[in-house]
């Protein structure tokens, strides 16, 4: 498996960051779409025979796939402080070629995604935290659509903490497979 990005070089690893909140009460909430994606990615990579090294750190969970030259982290700082965990990882490693952040997005319907560089939703606190800590927007984003209110007036700050239905989780798994096939070489 390789990333399909032409800017990557074999010498330096890529960092994939899945955004979410830690704790069982947040496990399948909309705000955890980034965690759900990286968990799915890890499962698929292992099914394809790639070995990983996993380590719990104070501020993040770290997974490294040596054969893919890929680090994956899941911040433990809660969503609004995700930048602290990302900055700590980058300061520790200082050897990252590129970064891809995967996160939920209320501007996109469930089952949709956008792959972008240097821009994204204006009101995502996890992304804002990363930008503030790194003083940069120079990273890729995979924005996972979570919107499915169907006109029901639920404030976004509340809605991101609603759990996905079983049908929505199935839709996400299909979407995650599509993203992996499109943006990663398996």
Image (cartoon, grey):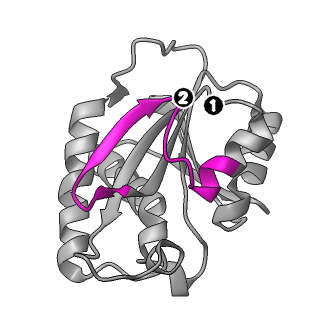
Q: Taking the image as drawn, is residue 62 in sight?
A: no
Q: CA distance from mark 2 to mark 1?
A: 5 Å
In magenta segment, residue 119? yes
In percent of width and height, residue 75 lies at: 65, 58
* Residues in magenta, as a range: 107-128
Q: Does the stretch in magenta take in 143? A: no
Is 119 positioned to the left or the right of 4 in the image? right
Give coordinates of residue 140: x percent, y percent.
Answer: 50, 32
Q: Is residue 164 left or right of residue 116?
A: left
Residue under numbered circle 1: 137
Q: How many marks?
A: 2
Contact, mark 2 vs mark 1 (Cβ under 8 Å): yes
- Give the answer, above or below, for where 26 lies relative to 59: below
Whichever of labels 2 and 1 marks the residue nearer the N terminus, that label is 2
As displayed, is residue 22 above or below residue 12? below
If the image is split into quadrants, where does the N terminus sit? Answer: top left
Label 2, residues with CA under 10 Å away: few <14, some 14-19, many ≥20: few
Q: Is residue 86 above or below residue 54?
A: above
**How many C-alpha atoms fall within 10 Å of the one at disc 1: few (<14), some, or many (≥20)?**
some
Q: Which residue is mark 2?
A: 118
x and y, in percent, of residue 99 in the image: 57, 32
**Residue drawn at the location 62% of the way across and 55% of the way down:** 126
Quarter of the image that includes the C terminus? top left
Rendered position, 99 above or below 12: below
């Amino acid at each position: 498996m390789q990333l399909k990005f032409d800017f990557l070089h074999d010498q330096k690893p890529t960092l994939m960051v899945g955004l979410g909140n830690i704790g069982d009460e947040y496990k399948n909430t909309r705000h955890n779409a980034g965690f759900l994606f990286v968990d799915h990615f890890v499962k698929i990579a292992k099914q394809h025979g790639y070995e990983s090294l996993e380590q719990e750190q104070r501020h993040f969970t770290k997974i490294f796939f040596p054969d893919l030259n890929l680090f994956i982290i899941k911040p433990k700082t809660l969503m609004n402080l995700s930048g602290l965990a990302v900055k700590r990882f980058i300061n520790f490693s200082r050897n990252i070629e590129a970064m891809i952040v995967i996160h939920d997005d209320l501007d996109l319907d469930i089952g949709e995604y956008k792959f972008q560089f240097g821009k994204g939703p204006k009101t995502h606190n996890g992304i804002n935290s990363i930008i503030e800590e790194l003083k940069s927007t120079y990273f890729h984003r995979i924005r996972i659509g979570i919107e499915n209110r169907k006109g029901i007036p639920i404030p976004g700050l509340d809605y991101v903490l609603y759990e996905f239905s079983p049908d929505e989780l199935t839709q996400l798994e299909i979407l995650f497979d599509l993203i992996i096939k499109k943006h990663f070489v398996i």
